[in-house]
Image (cartoon, rainbow, N blue to C red):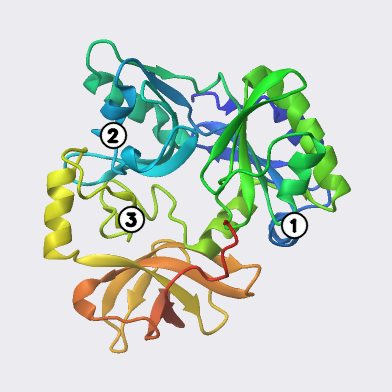
Amino acid sequence: MTELLRSPLHDRHVALGAKLADFGGWEMPIEYTASGGGVLKEHAAVREGVGVFDVSHLGKATVRGPGAAEFVNACLSNDLARIAPGQAQYTLCCDESGGVVDDLIAYLVSADEVFLVPNAANAAEVVRRLAAAAPAGIEVVGQHRDFAVLAVQGPRSAEVLAELGLPAAQDYMAYADAEWDGLPVRICRTGYTGEHGYELVPAWGAALALWDALAETVSGLGGMPAGLGARDTLRTEMGYPLHGQDLSATISPVQARSGWAVGWSKDAFWGRDALTAEKAAGPTRTLRGVESLDRGIPRAHMPVLDAAGAAVGEVTSGTFSPTRRVGIGLALIDTAAGVADGDELALDVRGRRSAVRVVRPPFVPSHVR
């Protein structure tokens, strides 16, 4: 069995009584107990105040060399020409069939440098594909354990950064390179919770001291450390897709309603021909939101049924919404079924029907901007 990788904050997670699990080959915290947390409390802290997450398992890579940004733009789905240096962009790495190898954040440093943050499980494959396609003079460097990633999320997140003397006035999806305690840290106005927040990228060796300072400040403002369990309930309330469930090699961005992250007018990107054809023809299934009308909770792989009991789709992600106090989820619904927002369907819960309504996410208001 391959030994799980650990973040530079592993000992802190253990001290906080974290329940640990495998996330993309990394041993990471699901929730904390010694801090008085747990998924529901950690979720509420982020929605109402502030929480701090360790997401150092995320991948990191740099593409550099003459024309690096132009090269990345010819590979990944979104259009880097839409943003300027100092900004970041959500984008997709697709294969030639239009399937999604990964979704990731691209930081545009300059025309000759792009910093990438893919998902942990897919980071090596994204790096491999880019390196294989890179022309002479452009290098693709995996830096998975060179940097940590800490996320400060919630309505009071700007206060946390201000108390530590870090820049907090960036526009959404813009970043600033700063110093903390004499060490460099990149700070981007983004996150995966739907709240005002930031993702901080310090050097691996500087992460522990920065985490301690963030955690102390967060605690002083009534917040707490949050684990990846709360991160999942928070992102599901926003309807944000999770790769491997709502996006995958078999679930295209057209099906997942992620076409906004595709630069359709670009001359080239991986999967362009297949995705353009699928967009023109219309997808055979579409990712929709569902919310429970009874005490049922949507879970991945549950069949979705129409009024006659025929299967018309499948749940891809589902959870209990701590904010709404109802079951919510995302489901791929057959386009031919003619389902519209507001329609009532059912889930097959081990042979029992559970009523749901089709809705358009987010399930709770977004406050990212």
Of pointers 3 and 2, the one earlier in the residue sequence: 2
Q: Can you say which quadrant of the picture contains the C terminus?
A: bottom right
Is residue 206 shown left or right of residue 275?
right
Question: How far from the left and from the top, in percent, is residue 356?
Answer: 45, 81
Q: Nearer the viewer, mark 2 or mark 1?
A: 2
Residue at 45% in and 37% down: 119
Q: Is residue 167 visible?
A: yes
Residue at 39% in and 53% down: 245
User: Quick one: label 1, few (<14), some, or many (20+) residues within 10 Å?
Assistant: many
Is residue 119 shown left or right of residue 184?
left
Give the residue type that dot 2 points to: Asn
Of pointers 1 and 3, the one earlier in the residue sequence: 1
Q: Nearer the viewer, mark 1 or mark 3?
A: 3
Q: Is residue 111 above or below residue 74?
A: above
Q: Is residue 240 above or below residue 96?
A: below
User: Quick one: label 3, few (<14), some, or many (20+) residues within 10 Å?
Assistant: few
Quarter of the image holding residue 337?
Answer: bottom left
Residue at 67% in and 24% down: 8
Which label was assigned to residue 260? 3
Question: How far from the left and from the top, in percent, is residue 298?
Answer: 48, 69
> Where does label 1 land, which residue?
45
Describe the element under mark 1 as helix, strand or loop. helix
Question: How far from the left and from the top, in percent, is residue 332?
Answer: 32, 66
Q: CA distance from mark 3 to mark 2?
A: 15 Å
Give the residue type that dot 3 points to: Trp
Quarter of the image holding residue 176?
Answer: top right
Question: How far from the left and from the top, in percent, is residue 251?
Answer: 28, 53
Outermost residue toward the top in this view: 137
> Where does label 2 land, which residue?
73
Give the residue type that dot 1 points to: Ala
Describe the element under mark 3 as helix, strand or loop. helix
